[in-house]
């Protein structure tokens, strides 16, 4: 069967650039800014009016000043680097392991049923319960942080990948089969794209959890990083400095979330959660 | 001449022999298809109609190799179908789920060719031609979900055409599009069929559509399914939505198919299952008033 009879030399496909910019309401940003300013103002006033002892809660201006001083210190950036290193490595290991295992378990009915109860048992164990184990195994080193981070982040991603693999559309799968796509080709072209939105959600959740565990590990175990600096500032009575570091961890959390949203938006432009209205 | 039930007629492109499908469920065995035998000549456009629940989808899954029949077999150019055959393409009713939303229109059409290792230049040509044939050469960079339902089904048809199948199976492809789009798509299928000379098996529940499109209409009985009747559609070759549908012969054929389906619904079964009937007497000078 040839399609030579079809009109050949089709006109060059007109490249359609669809600008689908959604104009954000400027009022939304203004309101957000007003909220932050209001919060800082309240924070500033509470200790200044004597509602709370300034020794326990210094005014916002002092904390921000301390944070700006921190920004100029090498030690601060070294601590940030340590925390981010643990966060990134832990997240990477958790995601890699969860994706591989998720695809293997998810594509086999037998494995899914066989592992289900074990996963449901292991998943709710709080990672911090493993702190004694981490100290026993690795002492005050980055490996301790990694153990906690990987354990906490792994389940977030695994569960999402399992949901994603199970969500493959029958019609899409049958279509792929009728066009001769084998098992590996179907994983690449059908199962993986179907799972991707779930995976991205899992990674975003895991990224937040990984930061929490990174700080916790440093704080409790004393492995190097922002968490340990917070503990040191507290024991040294540098209250403003301590709050400044807490603020810094919050800023890192916001940046991580923004980064994850950005990646999600870029990779899932086709997905219903991201794509804009139908234009035809 | 009685054809050997194990041997397809030599000229048959697609041959269904004594097909039977029994589903094993918790509530016991369910016989969806009892005994189906029919042949499709190369280049034939046959429509398959039947009451709802008559096992049309089961039959199509068996033909396309997605599901193994309990008994009997499907032959494509004389070769037994045991998995999805290379020379066959399927267009599903659910275009929204059949097209991959994560791929642009062009990539959707190209994927089966890419998977087969067709060289790039050849691939580009086939995709361009297929999109041109369905009238969609202006939207290759769009995503399927940015298009209307009718256009999405055109993309699915383009993907099937680009694959260069010898047999095209269509599972109620126009059931989910509006009436006007449906008329356009019906004419598109006739045009593509004539241009490419492929064999098409078109499953539908729409009696008008089956008579308008086909050279032949195969009517299925209710489940467990056998062939209720197999009639030739002796309408003029050139079909036109207005002209053809207002022909007296069109009305006669439609009546006949309708009656048969009503009989099938009541559980009336043909005396000898699978025996093709000659259909109603062709009206004299049918289509004489069509230029």
Image (spheres, helix red, strand yellow):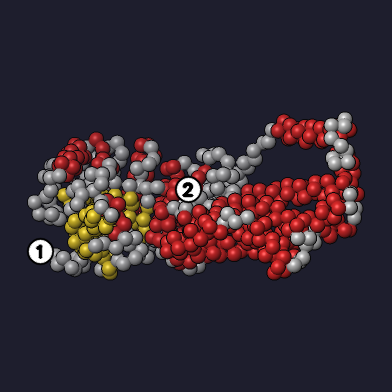
Q: Secondary structure at mark 1?
A: loop
Give the number of marks: 2
From the viewer's side, name the closer residue of B251 and B267: B267
Indicate left or right for B180 with B28 as reference. Answer: right
Return the residue at label 2: B136
- Tell me the CA gap for discs 1 and 2: 47 Å
Q: Residues within 10 Å of mark 1 (few under 14, many from 20)?
A: few
Picture quadrant where residue A77 is located: bottom right
Picture quadrant where residue B169 is located: bottom left
Q: Which mark is residue B1?
A: 1
Residue shown at the point (16%, 49%) measured from the top left: B228
Quadrant location of the N terminus of chain A?
Answer: bottom left
Residue shown at the point (10%, 63%) measured from the top left: B1
Residue B213 on image: x %, y % = 28, 46
Mark closer to the observer (1, 2)? 1
Indicate left or right for A51 with B77 as reference. Answer: right
From the viewer's side, name the closer residue of A203 and B114: A203
Indicate left or right for A141 with A149 as reference. Answer: right
Residue B247 on image: x %, y % = 22, 37
Q: Which mark is residue B245?
A: none
From the viewer's side, name the closer residue of A14 and B286: A14
Indicate left or right for A267 with B110 as reference. Answer: right
Chain letter for mark 2? B
Pointer 1 with pointer 2, Cβ within 8 A: no
Chain letter for mark 1? B
Q: Is residue A218 above or below residue B150?
A: below
From the viewer's side, name the closer residue of B98 and B53: B53
Q: Is residue A108 above or below residue A205?
A: below
Q: Is residue A135 visible?
A: yes
Residue A207 on image: x %, y % = 67, 54
Q: Is residue B223 above or below residue A57?
A: below
């Amino acid at each position: 069967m040839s399609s030579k009879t079809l009109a050949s030399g089709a006109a060059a496909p007109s490249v359609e650039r669809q600008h689908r910019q959604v104009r954000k309401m400027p009022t939304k940003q203004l309101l957000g800014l007003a909220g932050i300013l209001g919060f800082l103002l309240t924070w500033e006033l509470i200790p200044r009016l004597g509602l709370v002892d300034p020794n326990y809660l210094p005014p916002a201006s002092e904390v921000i000043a301390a944070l700006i001083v921190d920004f100029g210190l090498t030690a601060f950036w070294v601590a940030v680097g340590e925390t981010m290193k643990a966060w990134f490595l832990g997240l990477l290991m958790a995601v890699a392991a969860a994706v591989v295992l998720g695809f293997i378990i998810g594509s086999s009915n037998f494995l899914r049923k066989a592992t289900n109860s074990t996963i449901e048992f292991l998943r709710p164990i709080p990672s911090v319960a493993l702190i004694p184990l981490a100290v026993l195994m690795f002492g005050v080193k980055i490996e301790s942080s990694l153990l906690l981070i990987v354990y906490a982040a792994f389940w977030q991603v695994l569960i999402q990948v399992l949901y994603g693999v199970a969500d493959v559309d029958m019609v899409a799968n049958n279509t792929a089969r009728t066009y001769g796509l084998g098992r590996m080709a179907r994983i690449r072209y059908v199962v993986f794209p179907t799972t991707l939105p779930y995976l991205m959600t899992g990674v975003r959740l895991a990224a937040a959890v990984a930061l929490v565990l990174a700080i916790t590990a440093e704080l409790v175990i004393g492995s190097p990083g922002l968490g340990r600096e917070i503990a040191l500032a507290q024991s040294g009575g540098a209250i403003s400095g301590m709050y400044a570091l807490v603020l810094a961890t919050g800023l890192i959390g916001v940046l991580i979330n923004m980064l994850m949203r950005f990646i999600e938006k870029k990779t899932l432009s086709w997905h219903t959660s991201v794509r804009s209205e139908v234009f035809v | 001449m009685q054809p050997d039930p194990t041997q397809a007629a030599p000229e048959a492109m697609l041959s269904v022999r004594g097909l039977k499908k029994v589903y094993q469920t918790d509530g016991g065995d369910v016989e969806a298809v009892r005994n189906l035998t029919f042949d499709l000549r190369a280049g034939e456009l046959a429509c398959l109609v039947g009451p709802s629940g008559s096992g049309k989808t089961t039959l199509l899954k068996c033909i396309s190799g997605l599901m193994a029949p309990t008994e009997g077999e499907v032959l494509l150019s004389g070769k037994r179908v045991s998995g999805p055959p290379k020379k066959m393409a399927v267009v599903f009713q659910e275009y929204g789920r059949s097209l991959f939303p994560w791929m642009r229109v062009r990539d959707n059409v190209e994927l089966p060719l890419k998977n087969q290792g067709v060289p790039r230049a050849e691939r580009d040509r086939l995709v361009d031609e297929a999109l041109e044939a369905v009238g969609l050469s202006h939207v290759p960079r769009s995503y399927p979900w940015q298009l209307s339902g009718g256009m999405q089904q055109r993309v699915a048809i383009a993907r099937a055409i680009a694959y260069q199948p010898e047999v095209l199976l269509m599972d109620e492809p126009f059931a989910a599009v509006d009436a006007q789009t449906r008329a356009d798509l019906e004419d598109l299928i006739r045009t593509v069929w004539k241009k490419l000379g492929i064999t098409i098996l078109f499953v539908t529940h729409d009696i008008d559509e089956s008579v308008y499109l086909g050279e032949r209409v195969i009517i299925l009985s209710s489940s467990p399914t056998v062939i209720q009747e197999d009639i030739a559609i002796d309408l003029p070759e050139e079909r036109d939505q207005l002209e053809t549908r207002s022909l007296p012969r069109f009305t006669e054929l439609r009546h006949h198919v309708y009656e048969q389906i009503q009989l099938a619904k009541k559980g009336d079964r043909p005396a000898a299952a699978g025996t093709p009937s000659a259909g109603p007497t062709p009206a004299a000078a049918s289509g004489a008033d069509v230029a």
